[in-house]
Amino acid sequence: MEQSTSSAAADGSALARGEGNPTASKKEIYTHDADWTIYAMGWSQREEPDRGFRLALGSFVEEYANKVSIIQRRDAYEKAVGSGVSRDRTAAALARSQGKRPEDAAFVQVGEFEHPYPATKILWSPDKTSKKDLLATTGDYLRVWSVPDQREASDAEAANVEMVALLNNNKNSEYCAPLTSFDWNDTDPTIVGTSSIDTTCTIWDLAVPQVKTQLIAHDKEVYDIAFARGKDIFASVGADGSVRLFDLRTLEHSTIIFETASLRPLLRLAWNKQDPNYLAAILADDPQTIILDVRVPSIPVAELGAHQASVNSIAWAPHSSCHLCTCSDDCQALIWDLTPLPKPIDDPILAYTADAEVNQLQWSTAHHEWVAIAYTNTVQALHV
């Protein structure tokens, strides 16, 4: 990650080369095709061999009935179920992954469950010590799911995913405004924050589970929420074009650290967990990514502009304070090195071109050298 594009290409990074060679001795790209368009996506944060390299994928189908599929890299799955039953179990898992010849499949589907409406976001619990690997989704409600590992699944069967909590942020009605996004607190995994089109952010205590606090965060719809490192500070962005900072210890007021020109909507927000002074955000229908320093409000410290179409998703490297990945409708995923700040940053250090517009990306916290991108019905894990 510290190298230039040319030296990275010499090492064979998938993002540097732009295209992968699936037959290479060290595989750089793993591809999986779902039966539907992929919208939400999340990496499991567990590092144990039987839970490693798992991804949850959310469908985007314009009807009530949607799905969340859980896939695992095939080599990790075969290692998880053990050599004695590996062949039969793998064959059964591959049978659930339609449209792929067994010898071609890089991932196997290890679980699937119905989800009302498309999930707007999927995150796995950051708690790496819990016996249960929990998964959360937002849509009409915040839902928490328990996902067993493959050793707990019966022979040749997919993991039986169980919903353990359904949380409604409207105390006065069984109906609630749709949730646009959420974030799971890394420091205290009992805390989850959700954002909604009703202008509110809600902080949940999953230990109870119940609402910890709810606040009117913006003047218009709230599109995203993200916690800083630690358990008290979080930020949100929304249709009013502002980035607002909150502190759970003093919720009487918030701080507007940035507003867009003409108050254009801000869609996504990502907080640098290695250096919490820095935030990244993207605007609606805009090819630029803005980098903000909370110590210098109002003015972006950088504007990353190499994309040729709207940026759709952003992710900071979980192990580095100066690397950021962006993806766009221009079919590219780019990795940026922000070390030169405050000098202008004109070009990314790594690039990958997909076969279609890239609408989602996630950087694995458990496996730092892997980034997952999604376009149409395809997900690719790229070695960086």
Image: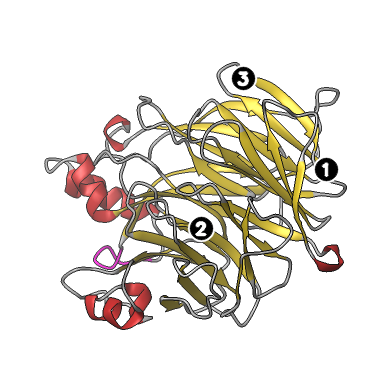
Q: Answer above or below: position of 208 versus 116.
A: above
- Which residue shows up at 38% across the image and 37% down it? 159
Query: Closer to the N terminus: mark 2 or mark 3?
Result: 3
Q: From which residue to which does the magenta span run?
A: 100-105
Nearer the viewer's eye, disc 2 or disc 3? 2
The answer to whether 201 appears left or right of 152 in the picture is right
- Which residue shows up at 28% across the image and 68% down it? 104
Look at mark 3 in the image and give the residue it sits on: 209
On the image, the x and y values in percent for residue 175 come to 81, 32
Badge 1 element = loop
Look at mark 2 in the image and give the residue it sits on: 315
Badge 3 element = loop
The answer to whether 86 appears left or right of 229 in the picture is left
CA distance separating discs 2 and 1? 24 Å
Look at mark 1 in the image and give the residue it sits on: 199
Where does the C terminus fall, quadrant-wise? bottom left
Can residue 375 be seen in the rendering of this structure?
no
* Dots 2, 3 in contact, CB < 8 A: no
- Which residue shows up at 49% across the image and 80% down it? 347
* Dots 2, 1 in contact, CB < 8 A: no
Q: Amino acid at mark 2?
A: Ala
Query: Closer to the N terminus: mark 2 or mark 1?
Result: 1
Q: Is residue 158 magenta?
A: no
Res 130 label: none
Q: Answer above or below: position of 51 versus 1.
A: above
Q: Amino acid at mark 3?
A: Pro
Task: Please name the colour scheme applied to the rendered image.
Answer: secondary structure
For the stretch drawn in magenta, the main secondary structure is loop
Q: Residues within 10 Å of mark 3 (few under 14, many from 20)?
A: few
